[in-house]
Amino acid sequence: MAKGAAFGLALLALAQGGAATPALALDCAKAQSRIERAICADEGLQREDAAFAKFYFALLAKLRAGNNGASKENSPDEGGVLVADQRKWLKTREAECASGEQQRQRACISDSIKRRREELGHEWVGLPGDADLVKAGKLTLGKLTAPVTADKSCPECKEYVLSYQGSEIASTSEDSRVRWGDPPLQIEHRLKRGDDEAALLVVHDGGEMNCMHYQVLWTDPAQGIRWAPLGESCYTHAGVSIPRQSRGLYDVSRS
């Protein structure tokens, strides 16, 4: 696995339980196997599973983004390799942890998740995010900078674009701040490992529903700042969550 492939792996684990995170955890209403039921019966295991699910899908999104437009002859499908390896790990864990009394089963599941995270390169240090990129006027990631600029063609629209070397990363308007009180663009969390840095970007679109779009950004020695979408979720005025893209850790074993 390439060095850049693991940069954003640990990023979303810092965002457990917050409203501004994608819903990527196991759906306990659909739990079927003994392992799934054991996780859903234990709050601690649910937290561990949810954190690891976010690690996994952040990495998968980046691997697939990295393969877009690449020649199959010169660039192996790293995303496909990861999915196949994940299915194998799930089957192994099912065989190792499905039997035994409850305490032994819990310890087995927890240890399996921790070992899997280590295998995938979890060696990151958490850093504070940036509450409002529009006010800051830029995003700084490692030693690199991406400006946030206003759309000069329509000053009254108060629309902003986050870009890097002429390529748009994300855009939105002040509508989110006016309607919902949320900053249009913000970095929710950061992670750093040596000279490498990754961040979770949240884009509020300010529509009738409070929709948040997520992207993982990371530094690449050869290409500078790179990014990949992670999904989106929306909230009504009543605070009801309406996820538009919701995937769970166990979906990979059923897809």
Image (cartoon, rainbow, N blue to C red):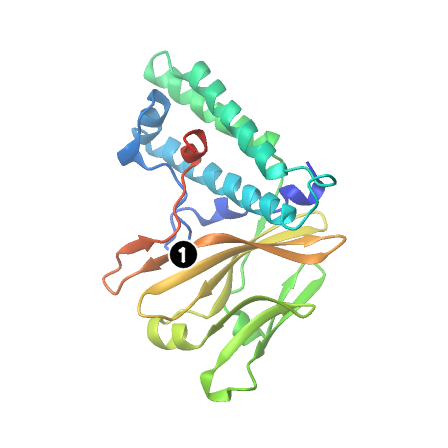
Question: Which SS class for mark 1?
Answer: loop
Query: Residue 166: which quarter of the image?
Result: bottom right
Depth check, front residue: 58 or 11: 58
Give the residue type that dot 1 points to: Ala
Name the residue located 59 percent from the left edge and 38 percent from the top edge. Answer: 79
The relative height of residue 248 versus residue 146 in the rendered view (above or below) is: above
Number of labels in the image equals: 1
Going by the picture, which residue comes out furthest to the right?
A: 222
The relative height of residue 23 versus residue 83 in the rendered view (above or below) is: below
The relative height of residue 33 versus residue 158 in the rendered view (above or below) is: above
Name the residue located 23 percent from the left edge and 62 percent from the top edge. Answer: 238
Name the residue located 37 percent from the left edge and 36 percent from the top edge. Answer: 26
Q: Where is residue 36 in the image (x, y as percent from the top left)?
A: 35, 27
Residue position marked by numbered label 1 in the rendering:
20
Query: Residue 28: which quarter of the image?
Result: top left
Name the residue located 54 percent from the left edge and 64 percent from the top edge. Answer: 130
Horizontally, is 128 left or right of 192 in the view?
Answer: left
Going by the picture, which residue comes out furthest to the left?
A: 238
Depth check, front residue: 170 or 254: 254
Question: Which of the image's four quarters has the C terminus?
Answer: top left
Q: Position of residue 13 (x, y in %)?
A: 49, 44
Horizontally, is 28 left or right of 83 in the view?
Answer: left
